[in-house]
Amino acid sequence: MTMVSLCLDDDMKKQLDELCNEMGMNLTTFFTIYAKKALRDRCIPFDITAPLDPFYSDSNITQLKKANQQIKNGQVVVKTIEELEAMEFE
């Protein structure tokens, strides 16, 4: 047997202890089951995803499509940087 040590946030460990207890096991059993499944399936036994870039969120894509349509329809106001800066103080 080999001893494996890991660090968990205190609250996370407490919650995990409680969950394992409800399932009739301890943390060692929990991590052993996890490791056996990962080795058997040759993958991490759950999906790991990165959050999407907020630029590509549904609401932003909707706004981009709306702006694109306004450009196509000629509904565009063109201002110089000086004009925009002057508007800031109005």
Image: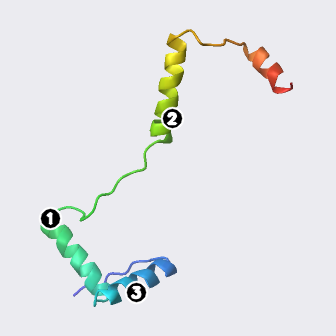
Q: Which mark, by number, is residue 15?
A: none
Q: Which residue is mark 3?
A: 18
Measured in 3D between alpha carbons, the distance from the residue under mark 3 to the one under mark 1, in whole angstroms, is 27 Å
Q: Which residue is mark 1?
A: 41
Q: Are marks 3 and 1 in contact (CB under 8 Å)?
A: no
Query: Which element carries disc 2, helix, strand or loop?
Result: helix
Give the quarter of the figure containing the C terminus.
Answer: top right
Measured in 3D between alpha carbons, the distance from the residue under mark 1 to the one under mark 2, in whole angstroms, is 38 Å
Q: Nearer the viewer, mark 1 or mark 2?
A: 2
Residue toward you, 80 or 59: 59
Residue at the spot 49% in from the left edge and 76% down from the top edge: 9
> On the picture, is 39 further left or further right than 9?
left
* Residue 18, above or below 38: below
> On the picture, is 79 further left or further right than 40?
right
* Residue 1, above or below 66: below
> On the picture, is 37 further left or further right than 15?
left
Amino acid type, label 2: Asn
Dot 1 or dot 2: first in sequence order is 1
- Residue 40 picture quarter: bottom left
Amino acid type, label 3: Glu
- Residue 86 picture quarter: top right
- Residue 30 picture quarter: bottom left
* Residue 72, above or below 84: above
Dot 3 or dot 1: first in sequence order is 3
Q: Which residue is mark 2?
A: 60
Query: Farthest right residue?
Result: 90
| Local crowd size for mark 3, using a 10 Å CA cut-off: few (<14), some (14–19), many (≥20) | some
| Local crowd size for mark 1, using a 10 Å CA cut-off: few (<14), some (14–19), many (≥20) | few
Query: Which element carries disc 3, helix, strand or loop?
Result: helix
Amino acid type, label 1: Asp
Instruction: Where is residue 54? Give x, y as percent.
Output: 50, 41
Dot 2 or dot 3: first in sequence order is 3
